[in-house]
Image (tube, helix red, strand yellow):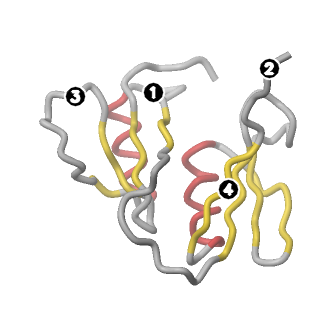
Amino acid sequence: MASRISELVLSCADPERLARFWSEVLGYVELDREDGMIEIGPPAGFGGLQPTIILSASSDPRTGKLPLHIDVNPVDRDQDAELERLLALGARPADVGQTGDEPWHVLADPEGNEFCLLRRRLEP
C-alpha cells in the first residue's frame, strides 16, 4: 500500500481571504475552523481522492518563491474561459520567467502564491 496526499497546509496572512479564493477556484467548501486555521475541501469531506487545504494564519513574512505550487485544470470549460474566471476571482498573472509559448498560465493567488492553470480539461 502506498501513501497519498490527504492535506496541503498553506501558511498565510489572511486565511479567510484565501479560503474564499481557493474554495471558489476548486469548488471546495469549508470543512473545519480552529485556532486560526481554516480547512477547505470537496463537499464530500476529508478522505476522498482530492486533498483538503488547511490555510494556517501566520505573521511570518514570506521571502522568495514557494518551493511548492499548485497546478489546476479546468473541469467544465476550456482553459481560456477558466483563465477569465480565475482572474475575476482575484488571481493575477505571475512572471516566473516563462517564454509565452507554454501551454499553461502562471498565476498568483491574492497573497502572491504562484499556481499554474494547465490546458488539459479533466472530468469533474
User: Of discs 1 and 2, which sits in the foreground?
Assistant: 2
* Residue 77 marker: 1
Q: Earlier in the sequence, mark 2 or mark 4?
A: 2
Identified by mark 3, the residue type is: Glu
Q: Earlier in the sequence, mark 1 or mark 2?
A: 2
The alpha-carbon separation of the residues under discs 2 and 3 comes to: 32 Å
Disc 1 residue crowd, few under 14, some 14–19, many 20+, Cα 10 Å? few
Residue found 38% across the figure and 56% down from its top? 108
Q: Earlier in the sequence, mark 3 or mark 1?
A: 1
Tell me residue 58's x, y (percent).
Answer: 62, 78
* Residue 102 marker: 3
Quarter of the image where the C terminus is located: top right
Say above or below: 11 vs 79.
below
Residue found 55% across the figure and 59% down from its top? 21
The residue tagged 4 is 9
Residue found 68% across the figure and 48% down from its top? 8
The alpha-carbon separation of the residues under discs 4 and 1 comes to: 28 Å
Q: Earlier in the sequence, mark 4 or mark 1?
A: 4
Say above or below: 37 vs 1.
below
Q: Earlier in the sequence, mark 2 or mark 3?
A: 2
Helix, strand or loop under label 3: loop
Disc 3 residue crowd, few under 14, some 14–19, many 20+, Cα 10 Å? few
* Residue 2 marker: 2
